[in-house]
């Protein structure tokens, strides 16, 4: 039996958070591009190898910061269908914390990501809760 999902009027908040993260991700991507030139890590190489590049750790810290976007988008969009204000609030918190995580991590010292950016790591589990609740409510199983 198919269930119809309506888009709640507060879903605009979810879209606003999504757009803010897209802009953050564009900015982070430009930082990775600049780091590629600076540390001489050219495509198609995704991560620098320490034996080949003395600045590998600094570059890898920048590159690492782009990996969480698909999971964030999926949980934000699905969770926002049922709990848009909660999903947008958690997503906004995640976006701000992700900025600080990136700034700290891209310094080249991985431990710097734990200053303010540590709190970003607290967002994904709660952000996963709205999609889980949606799946329970509609008798679906998320695999």
Image: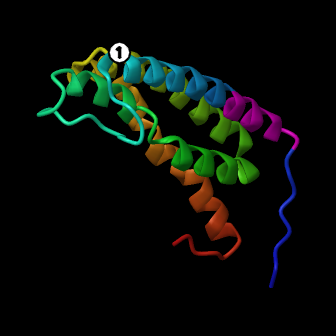
Q: Is residue 97 left or right of residue 23?
A: left
What residue appears at the point 21 percent right and 21 percent down from the top-left corner? 55
Query: Residue 21 appears at what percent x and percent y?
Result: 62, 29
Magenta: main secondary structure equals helix
Q: Is residue 124 visible?
A: yes
Q: Secondary structure at mark 1?
A: helix
User: What segment is highlighted magenta in the picture?
Assistant: 9-19
The colour style of the image is rainbow
What residue appears at the point 44 percent right and 41 percent down from the top-left corner? 67
Per the image, the residue denoted by label 1 is 38
Q: Is residue 97 visible?
A: no
138 and 53: which one is in front? 53
Would you identify the image quadrant in which residue 90 lies? Answer: top right
Residue farthest to the left?
Answer: 51
- Based on the picture, tell me whether residue 16 belongs to the magenta stretch: yes
What residue appears at the point 36 percent right and 17 percent down from the top-left corner? 116
What residue appears at the point 67 percent right and 25 percent down from the top-left corner? 20
Would you identify the image quadrant in which residue 39 lies? Answer: top left
Query: Residue 104 appears at what percent x and percent y?
Result: 33, 17
Would you identify the image quadrant in which residue 1 lies? Answer: bottom right
Pointer 1: residues within 10 angstroms few (<14), some, or many (20+)? few
Query: Residue 106 appears at what percent x and percent y?
Result: 34, 19
- Based on the picture, tell me whether residue 22 belongs to the magenta stretch: no
Q: Is residue 128 above or below residue 121?
A: below
Residue farthest to the bottom?
Answer: 1
26 and 75: which one is in front? 26
Count the marks: 1
Query: Residue 122 appears at what percent x and percent y?
Result: 40, 36
């Amino acid at each position: 039996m198919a269930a119809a999902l309506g888009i709640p009027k507060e879903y605009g908040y979810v879209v606003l958070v999504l757009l803010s993260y897209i802009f953050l991700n564009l900015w982070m991507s430009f930082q990775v591009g600049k780091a590629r030139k600076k540390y001489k890590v050219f495509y198609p190489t995704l991560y620098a190898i320490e034996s080949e590049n003395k600045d590998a750790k600094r570059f890898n810290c920048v590159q690492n910061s782009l990996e969480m976007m698909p999971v964030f988008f999926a949980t934000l969009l699905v969770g926002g269908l049922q709990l848009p204000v909660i999903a947008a609030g958690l997503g906004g918190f995640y976006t701000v914390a992700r900025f600080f995580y990136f700034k700290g991590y891209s310094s080249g010292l991985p431990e710097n990501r734990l200053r303010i950016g540590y709190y970003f790591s607290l967002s994904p589990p709660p952000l996963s809760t709205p999609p889980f609740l949606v799946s329970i409510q509609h008798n679906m199983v998320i695999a």
